[in-house]
Amino acid sequence: MTSINAGGAFYRVQNSLNANSEAVSKSMQRLASGQQNIAPGEKSSQVALAYGMKAELASLKVGIQNGTEVLNVMEMSNNDLGILNDMMVRLEELNALGSNALNSDEDKAAILKEAQLLITEYKDVHTRSLWKGNTIFGGSATVGFGRNSGDAMTITAGTAPTLTVTATKISTGVNTTALATDKEALDVAIVTAGNVYNTVSNKMAHMSSLRAGYALDVASKLDVDFAGETTELAKGQILAQAGTAMLAQANAQGQGMLALIQS
């Protein structure tokens, strides 16, 4: 039986067409903005979680910057310790040279002069081993590495020993015990600085991995899935074309009813 209600198809098709048009519009907004949540109330819990992770990620990024600075400080410290070690080795050589009873007065004077210069330079390395005005050797600093990346660390480059040897005795080769003591202390400082560098390097490797994980987690909650959303857009556009065609047919059906009445 044909009734006036047949015209209801027009309104149902129109309603479907409007809903699909809204879906297409949202897909286009997501693709244009790169964000999967384009309305304030859309997936609000997911957005809140993502923003919390973004805060942790921001903290971690600064922590990595802090760690990088620590590595730079320790690299400078290790370089200076290497310089001090070379000086110490040369002082041992001079001490051995001074242990020769056949040395002339000129020989002793040359050994004495070089030893004096080395000891002065050794002290100068201590003085200039600064980072942003802070003493490196014998000093310490507490450095944070960001939220959830481990506790803050107290960094120390070790205490490079001051020399107990004297240039006068080196020129006559009687400083063997003092040199051995100073060298042992310097070796401890070198090992300490190296251990700190390795510890921070390991922490940095963990932090880099953690940062990548945080970034992926935030992206999964906020960034649009371009492949998936493009598919949805294409689907919506096809449905829009089909809906428009069906709307025309529904309208034609109404026109048929009108023609029947008029006949």
Image (cartoon, rainbow, N blue to C red):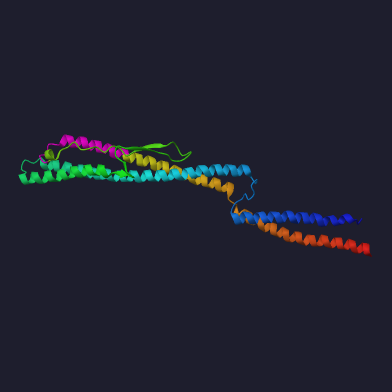
Residue 63 in percent (x, y) is at 44, 43
Q: Residue at x 75, y 60 (%)?
A: 242
Q: Is residue 231 left or right of residue 117?
A: right
Residue 104 seen by the camera: no
To which quarter of the image does residue 187 belong?
A: top left
Chief SS of the magenta region: helix
Residue 103 in percent (x, y) is at 6, 44
Q: Which residues are magenta?
A: 171-192
Residue 222 in percent (x, y) is at 58, 48
Which residue is farthest front?
A: 133
Quadrant in the picture for the C terminus: bottom right
Is residue 184 shown in magenta? yes
Is residue 63 shown in magenta? no
Please state the total of marks drawn on the protein image.
0
Q: Residue at x 18, y 44 (%)?
A: 118
Which residue is farthest right?
A: 263
In this rendered view, identify the residue nearer to me: 188 or 67: 67
Residue 200 seen by the camera: yes
In this rendered view, identify the residue nearer to me: 88 or 138: 138
Q: Is residue 28 left or right of residue 208?
A: right
Residue 116 in percent (x, y) is at 15, 43
To which quarter of the image does residue 197 belong?
A: top left
Q: Residue at x 12, y 39 (%)?
A: 168
Q: Is residue 74 left or right of residue 10?
A: left
Quadrant in the picture for the N terminus: bottom right
Q: Is residue 209 left or right of residue 243?
A: left
Q: Residue at x 39, y 41 (%)?
A: 200
